[in-house]
Image (cartoon, rainbow, N blue to C red):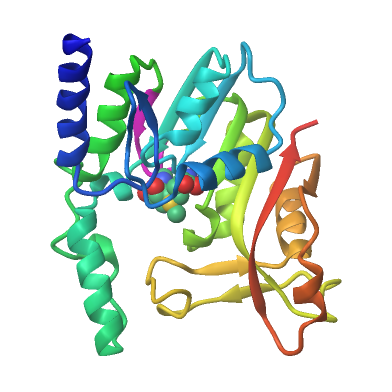
Amino acid sequence: MIALSSQRRRLQRKVDAVPFWWHSIDLGNGVVTPGHKSPDTLRREFDALALPDLRGRSVLDIGGWDGFFAFEAERRGAARVAVLDHYMWSMDSPGQQAYWRRCKAEGVAPQPYHETEFWHPDTLPGKRGFDLAREALGSAVEPIVADFMSCDLAGLGRWDIVLYLGVLYHMEEPLSALRRLEAVTGELAVVETEAIVVPNLEHEALWRFFPGAELNGDISNWWAPNLAALLGALRAAGFASAHPLAAPPAALLAAPGGPHHYRLTAQATTS
Ligand SMILES: C[S@@+](CC[C@H](N)C(=O)[O-])C[C@H]1O[C@@H](n2cnc3c(N)ncnc32)[C@H](O)[C@@H]1O
């Protein structure tokens, strides 16, 4: 009992020493990381992906950050799981967030974060959470430190299931990104993204462009598609089929004006 609680205190101290957590991850012994995304949110988000049985499958989580989705895939029996990331792993997140808040308060657009003093690809300060969670869980999830837009796809290989969650709208070239996604997908890719509804124009494939920091004051947001644009882009990228997991909210379709924003999840298959 005493050994367990001292183990727990040691783990809690390590969790507290990580300056920023994006994901709440249950590390066991009653220790849950204090993520920006709560355990309830993450459970809902995972369920909303409507993934098939993961037992024995390979899963690649592109832009997986602290790794919640990858660790969960491993817990559900996936045979091989990896997180590929580099951007937030290279970031001093507390510094970058304070900078973002300052810019917002002053009404100026931030510099691209990878051109600021908060970018440290040499020491990867933003990967500490993933590393600690992996160690505490005794996990075999593989970290792949790489920019998905420039890494060698042949070396990465194909994975049965590929998660691309919260990443697409950060891409300057979303169609190229989806082509690369198709190239590493064996069976199924799941794309979750910021999306738009423009009432009465849902039949058109529309992308909203954010030349500066218009979306949430965040300079790293570039494009948000409507449903027709995302499905069309997935097919143009080479996927055999693509479908949304939920229709755009009826309230937004009926709301005056627009574009209105929501989060859209779609699945795309290679055959
Ligand atoms: C909004 S976060 C989403 C994190 C996680 N997938 C989730 O849904 O909770 C976007 C993630 O994409 C990563 N990312 C952005 N551009 C990337 C790129 N070119 N290659 C790999 N990862 C990238 C960021 O580092 C960050 O971890």
Between 174 and 203, the one lying in front of the other is 203
Judged left or right of residue 154, residue 200 is: right
Residue 60: x and y in percent read 52, 30
Residue 124: x and y in percent read 20, 41
Q: In which quadrant of the rendered view does residue 57 lie?
A: top right
Judged left or right of residue 206, residue 92 is: left
Judged left or right of residue 183, residue 18 is: left
Residue 50: x and y in percent read 71, 36
Between 255 and 170, the one lying in front of the other is 255
Is 39 situated above or below 138? below
Placement of the C terminus among the 4 image quadrants: top right
Whether residue 149 can be seen here: no
| Residue ID at (21%, 71%) | 99
Judged left or right of residue 257, residue 44 is: left
Question: Is residue 248 magenta-colored?
Answer: no
Residue 201: x and y in percent read 82, 79
Is 108 situated above or below 149? below
| Highlighted magenta segment, given as a residue range | 142-151
Whether residue 172 can be seen here: yes
Is 142 situated above or below 40? above
Between 154 and 57, the one lying in front of the other is 57
| Residue ID at (27%, 72%) | 100
Placement of the N terminus among the 4 image quadrants: top left
Q: In which quadrant of the rendered view does residue 5 lie?
A: top left
